[in-house]
Amino acid sequence: KAGVTQTPRYLIKTRGQQVTLSCSPISGHRSVSWYQQTPGQGLQFLFEYFSETQRNKGNFPGRFSGRQFSNSRSEMNVSTLELGDSALYLCASSPTSGRHTGELFFGEGSRLTVL
Amino acid sequence: DAKTTQPNSMESNEEEPVHLPCNHSTISGTDYIHWYRQLPSQGPEYVIHGLTSNVNNRMASLAIAEDRKSSTLILHRATLRDAAVYYCILRPSGGGADGLTFGKGTHLIIQP
């Protein structure tokens, strides 16, 4: 069974640009959540999607957005990039949304560098 | 909002047991305690979870205090491959963004 796939794995952007990251969950999983990981702040929750609907949202500005498609694949977008957006962006999938049994399966992440 | 507190780092010797503590004094009755770990250059991976009773699986054991305000992840015989950052999180069974907050975790160092 294929794991969670994130693309691209690495990318470099400049301030003011926008970026779109993609996440393909494990087959059959309907929940996708996104996280930002930086050395200073650790692993912070961005948002969660379940059946194409945003179920939860973390404390991030509106420049961070996402969506989920009917096949459960998800994308996140960051507009007007800032230097502080440089981070590892992780995606996780789960069969269920927000339930205790929802073990999260993480991808390897997309490392974004903003210059 | 339920939150967890973990030591920034811990060090242990190879082939010895490791006890990783986590405090969650504001835990609610419906919060499940989950543990994940993140090896270098990888995404986090699930380790174990529980509600009230102690839990065991092939990777580790989870000991939960009677008042549920703290828990301990136990690695019975640490190996070098267990060197990772360990995260303790609370996942409310009713859902919610707080149940998906990982924080900074405990950096476990294993000495050969």
Image (tube, grey):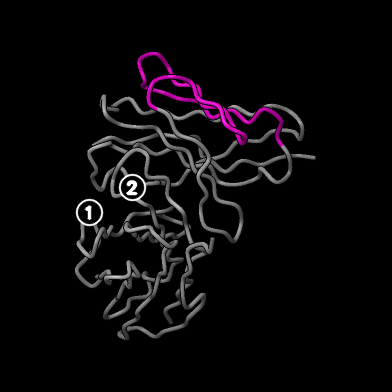
| Residue drawn at 55 percent across, 27 percent down | B56
In the displayed structure image, the side of residue B18 where residue A15 appears, left or right: left
The kind of secondary structure element at disc 2 is helix
* Chain designation of label 2: B
Instruction: Please state which amino acid type lies under the numbered disc 2.
Output: Leu
Residue B17, compared with residue B42, is above or below; it is: above
Q: Residues within 10 Å of mark 2 (few under 14, many from 20)?
A: many
Quarter of the N terminus of chain B within the rendering: top left
Quarter residue B2 falls in: top left
In the displayed structure image, the side of residue A110 where residue B59 appears, left or right: right
In the picture of the structure, the residue carrying the numbered disc 2 is: B100
Which contiguous range is marked in magenta?
B51-78
Q: Are marks 1 and 2 in contact (CB under 8 Å)?
A: yes
Q: Residues within 10 Å of mark 1 (few under 14, many from 20)?
A: many
Residue A6, compared with residue B67, is above or below; it is: below
In the displayed structure image, the side of residue B3 where residue B46 appears, left or right: right
* Chain designation of label 1: A
| Residue drawn at 67 percent across, 27 percent down | B76
Tell whether position B63 is magenta. Answer: yes
Quarter of the C terminus of chain B within the rendering: top right
